[in-house]
Image (cartoon, rainbow, N blue to C red):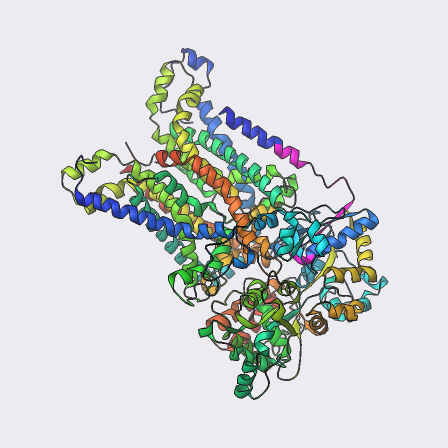
Amino acid sequence: MATTMITTLDRSSRAAARGLSDISIRNLFIIPTVLFLIVFNIFPLIYSLGYSFTDFRASTNAPANFVGLQNYRDLLNDPYVWSNFAITAKYVIVSVAGQLLVGFGVAMLLNRDIPLKGLITTLLLLPMMLSMAVVGLFWKLLYDPSWGVINYALGLGNFEWLADPKMALYAVALTDIWMWSPFVMLLSLAGLSAVPKHLYEAAAIDRAGPFYTFFRITLPLVAPILMIAVIFRTMEAFKTFDLAYILTSQPTAELISIRLYKMAFQEWQTGRSCAMAYIVLIMVLAITNIYVKYLNKVKER
Amino acid sequence: MAAVRTSSEIGFNRVAIVAVLVVTIIFLAPIYWIASTAFKPRNLATTIPPTVVFQPEISPFVKLFTKRSQLRSPPTPEEYAAAPWWERVVFDGGEKIVRDGKGQVQWSGYPSRFLNSLIIAITSTVLAVGMGTFTAYGFSRFKVKGEADLLFFILSTRMLPPVVVAIPMFLMYRAVGLNDSHIGLIILYTAFNLSFSVWLMKGFMDEIPKEYEEAALVDGYTRMEAFFKIVLPEAATGIAATAVFCFITAWNEYAFALIMTNRRAQTAPPFIPSQVGSGLPDWTVIAAGTFLFLLPVAIFTFLLRNHLLRGMSFGAIRK
Amino acid sequence: MRKLVTSVLAGIGLTLACGTSVYAQEKSLTIFWAEWDPANYLQELGNEYEKETGVKINVETTPWSDFQTKAFTEFNAHGDAYDLVVGDSQWLGAGSTGGHYVDLTDFFKKHDLGNVMAPATVKYYAEYPGNSGKYWAIPLEGDAVGWSYRKDWFEDPKEKEAFKAKYGYDLDVPKDFKALRDIAEFFYRPDQKRYGIAIYTDNSYDAMAMGFENALFSYGGDLGDYSTYKVDGHINSEKAVAALDAYKELYKFTPPGWAKSFFVEDNQAITENLAAMSMNFFAFFPSLINEASNPNAKNTGFFANPPGPDGDQFAALGGQGISVVSYSQKQDEAMKFLEWFIKDETQKKWAALGGYTCSAAVLKSPEFQSATPYNKAFYETMFKVKDFWAVPEYAELLQQLNQRVYPYMIGGSGTAKETLDALAGDWNATFKKYGRGQ
């Protein structure tokens, strides 16, 4: 296998003689984790793949029949499933973009000498410390036109956040933005604080405008961290379930994971839901792959 | 910063501080609402306009910790007088505390679930962060064949929707007897957090200059010694940050906790929403459960706040 | 690092300590149900059983929204965590054909339960397939949809006068669906923050379907033929179309934001002074007569689901029967508990504790009917109930109904006829897929 990239130890040295070799350390550090993850993921993956070609229903004791690609064909021909995908795409874009905008914006504001900065930052992190189900429960209450605080505070009267089919998805995304912007904020803050100060000083000496400084210095240097935030938030947004399920049941806000839950745990169409999961997995893999490629490119610059 | 501040810069700083305050208030308003509801009498929980000034009550917490049912007939004055204060509070709310066959007060599931949550979240966080740190170091310092692919594989373990993983995992757990056990959930959450932990820690490890260890190696340290004595202290900030994220995830996990556990290893998140069961939700109890459950994470994060602010840079930025 | 290691070890130690079961030592039975008051009553009843026999009864619960998921995950893995389960009526098909429930036919016949329990409860909570004479559960908690209303609004002389002037008849508890609609319209006053009616609209599981069934059955329509699985001419009949339009009409008079409402929201409509009338399962009414949870408790009245235009009067069924889980190690103990449970005095005790007994004798007794303001309406309703499909694939049928009806109800797309024709098409396809009927 590969050779170490750091100075190899002098074989006759005392340290090399009594310590483990670099290769054994590398293996010791990496292999358990990889094996653990393989064991933990390979079984569900094979199980799901196998059943995705059958009409298996976990709720009955009837044997599973092999149906070939029927499940995949049916799903890809189902207009409802396509609309679920479209809705999910819209949701992921709106909510991740919102989190990026709010989170990064707040980080820019916080990136200066502010009294009680530590306390304020911790307080701003509170929303993401709650469980999704609880957030859904409380926001449903807050959004209610009759007994919710939001309409009262904003003077919106009977504005229907969740009951209006056009609004519901955005209301869910708004809650998600509230909950997860702090995550992006924290990562951005870290990135911003790592931008070497001398770059700003140089820009100031050159009398560069704030826009120039932002787009030429700040953004490129923070971009890799923002990318990591985007990768994780996109993956999570794709899987959003509890929050949306509790907030609304509008067909216009039915995310793919809600459909998947109904198929797997209400209808018990195990085979079909496995096929659906594979379709989702392939999509997320593809999207993440693009992100990671881009991330590596950004890092290289 | 430039030595001389221009007046416009100072002006902008003021604007920024005001903006930060406004944002903080907006973000915290729902949290404040939850926290204040946890201390309200039930009839003030959902008033419009919201009740801001009220006599704080402890009754939501009494209710949170006990099993209750609707009072079908009011207690006699003697019963009421003989009852301890915490039972009277429940009577006042139109409910009674459920007792078992021996007349013992029935606790709600909350205290034991809270304890389970602590055990499971802490242990799995320690494991995920620990393993993640080792692995990240391995990837950061040594050449690994197919490193990019392996890292991507590690990332991908977090992509499958949990709904789908749940059925096969449940069957697997039952087969090996891990369902409804603390160890089962700990392993599960460790696996779940590991990808995140490896990715974050790899960023931190890349940040730590290799020269430090090399100097140590030359001084006669073994690689292991160098790792524990030189690298780990340097990575402390990263470890803290990763731990916060992993803890939050494990602490709040809902779906697997619901499916995999029955009575021994149940955690608190599935319990909190159960308070809507009897026809009218008691928002004060839900808020009390949420508020208490928020405290450990909030305290944990607050204690680590300096690490969070100082250390996060993920090595994404080149020197 | 040493700290880390210590805490890991401590964690593992604790885990092992907690791992040993404390439940195994004594004789006990575990009953699984949803998290609500009746489960507490059942626990209290179980305490009595423990006093008599020494066998401990543990009623375990989970929130309603997770109940089905949790129960079937356990069944599907052939788990023995629960000895008995108080399952929804729709689960009978999956429970029996999936081999999860123990066949109780002999038990049923031996104790003549077909006559001891109210007929509708036997038909819907116990028997599967319909008219097969095979029984899988003992009716435990009867339930159906009824209505609560604001007596003070209804009895206000000014309102009565205005109502009479507008509609030409007296304002009173609605005699039929037309009156229900008129009253809802009459009290619909957004400018006063008062609205006419609260109905079920949540389509994430069965709430909206249950709500719609109340209109459908009272209009004389039905979902289909439960023995031949023929749905054309049933679910899309003229009566069914009229019923769907009637239900959609009611949605107009609901409070704002009423697009995902179930028992919680409907009860809140009464407590928060939002609606004149509110649909709900009887099992959720106790909190409405409790002054601590409902400030309007004294002014809240109850009535049964009204008849439709042709005088048919039915209501959607809720409620559950108790079944023995076939994977339980303690089936004999479980059967002994059931023998005790069906005794007359136990049923009386069950009703006194607050359970909705299904025992015909207890239901008919004056003590029961006068025990609460809604027990009489409950008694009347329990002999006029119909239920959703109970086939193992009922959830698919439910999902199709939600998918077709909700956009029409809430979004206003298409017509009732188109909606129900499409639904009939979906259901035909599903029945064909599972080889039923035709």
Quarter of the picture containing the C terminus of chain A is top left
Q: Position of residue C279 (x, y in %)?
A: 60, 70
Q: Quick one: which residue is furthest to the left in this view? A: A206
**Foreground of the two, C311 or B91:** B91
Q: Position of residue C404 (x, y in %)?
A: 52, 70
Q: Residue B297: in sight, yes or no?
A: yes
Q: Is residue B317 left or right of residue C331?
A: left
Residue at screen point 72% across, 45% down: B104
Q: Position of residue C305 (x, y in %)?
A: 64, 75
Q: Is residue C177 above or below residue A150?
A: below
Q: Residue A86: in sight, yes or no?
A: no
Q: Quadrant of residue C39?
A: bottom right
Q: Is residue B122 left or right of residue A295?
A: right
Q: Quadrant of residue A123?
A: top left
Magenta span covers which residues?
C14-38
**Foreground of the two, B225 or A57:** B225
